[in-house]
Image (cartoon, rainbow, N blue to C red):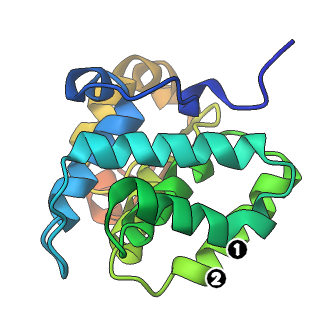
Amino acid sequence: MRSKVPSGIRWTGNKTKEELLDDPLAESLFGLFLKVKDSPRHIAFKPEKLINEVYYICNRFYQDAHPCAMIDSYAHDIESDMGWSYAADPVMSMAYIVVKSQRKNPDRVEELLQTIEEHYKFNCYWDECQRLVVKQKPKEPGKFYFGEDLSSLLKQNGQDLKKVLGKNPVFIINKVDQLNAILGNNAKIQK
């Protein structure tokens, strides 16, 4: 029997920093943590503790039959686990990224994403987290997603990029002028 939880976010227990850095999504969360750890409230716990909590809470999203009804319970549990009254803000913002990055989610989890957005979109970590959502968007054949620069695209998708360059690839980027400089007018550009 298959698990209801996507393999990219199964929580099997706390992982070390090294184990987390082997996972590209967790590595992105680690980088995000480093950006937001001092703004505007100083986050005094280790990044691996935060990321493990994010994966744990995401696992619960998929296990619970009605996760929307549990949003306050999740926040309370996060605060208890982390020992900080504001911990739900960064954890739920990052959990949103992790769940949003999955190719397909059950309807109840998609509803939960809307609920998380309604409850947490005004916290101080939300905007920075949303920048990562674009970078982690699931790949579709012939489409490449990246946030800030072409070097990240080339590192991650170099072989795929070489295969489709002659077939009018679709790039979704933040900086259109960079793509035009490299590919000229052969690309369809979406914002």
For residue 81, above or below residue 166: below
Q: Nearer the viewer, residue 105 or 141?
A: 105
Mark 2, secondary structure of its residue: helix
- Pick the quarter of the image with the N terminus: top right
Residue 173 rendering spot, x and y as whole percentages: 41, 57
Q: CA distance from mark 2 to mark 1?
A: 5 Å
Q: Nearer the viewer, residue 10 or 35?
A: 10
Q: Nearer the viewer, residue 179 or 160?
A: 160
Q: Residue at x 62, y 39 (%)?
A: 59
Q: Residue at x 58, y 28 (%)?
A: 10
Mark yes or no: residue 55 visible: yes
Left or right, 107 with respect to 96, comes to right
Farthest residue, direction bottom: 122
In the picture, the disc for residue 118 is 2
Residue contact at pointers 2 and 1, CB within 8 angstroms: yes
Amino acid tagged 2: Glu
Q: Residue at x 53, y 30 (%)?
A: 11
Mark yes or no: residue 101 visible: no
Check disc 1 and report the residue beneath it. 115
Left or right, 101 with respect to 89, comes to right
Amino acid tagged 1: Thr
Residue 131 rendering spot, x and y as whole percentages: 38, 64
